[in-house]
Image (cartoon, grey):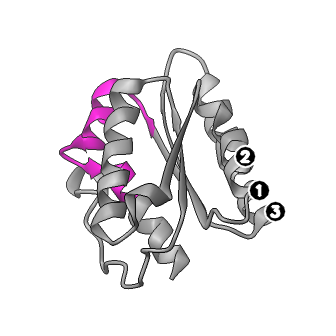
Amino acid sequence: MASSLKNLSEFNSEPTGNYSRKKIGIVVSEWNEDITGPLLEGAKEALLKYGVWENHIEVKLVPGSFELSFGAQCFAKHEEIDGVICLGCVIKGDTKHDDYINMAVANGLTQVSLKYDKPVIFGLVTTNDHQQAKDRSGGKHGNKGTEAAVTILKMLD
């Protein structure tokens, strides 16, 4: 179904495990903070809702979305971290810059996940304009941060 017709934060099933002892790292891009701030809040609220202890959620900021992969690796290399959520926003501009960033982040996060055998969740909002980003960070299409948190818990199941 096209995302224009669906709230992206509706799930077919909810996480069912005991997550109280799970430790989650969240890496958040400072670029487009008006989008990444609500993504972070959505992720934290969902983790708490499903039983992750607040003191088991650690947040680190990075300057932009390109730096999410390195931030994820910094978390993933620690044995006590069970998984990493990466949140950022890349809005299409007049050049192909967004394509390069999006592909680099997707490849980088995949490599970190495979290298450390841990879930690393791609919570990067990639849109054509600012309104689409707002719609996906707590607007009419839900919150990609919430979706990323549910995804990591399902992966930890």
- Specify the quadrant that holds the N terminus: bottom left
Disc 1 to disc 2, C-alpha distance: 6 Å
Q: Nearer the viewer, residue 75 or 92?
A: 75
Task: Tell me which numbered mark, 1 or 3, is placed earlier along the sequence.
Answer: 1
Q: CA distance from mark 1 to mark 3?
A: 9 Å
Give the numbered dot on residue 74: 2
43 left or right of 4 in image: right
Question: Taking 71 as reference, is 133 left or right?
Answer: left
Q: Position of residue 18 (x, y in %)?
A: 41, 82
Which residue is disc 3 drawn over?
115
- Taking the view exactly as shown, the residue that stands out farthest to the right is 115
Residue 116 visible to an observer of this rendering: yes
The residue range painted magenta reads: 126-148
- Residue drawn at (40%, 25%) of the image: 33
* Residue tagged 1: 77
State yes or no: discs 1 and 2 in contact (Cβ < 8 Å).
yes
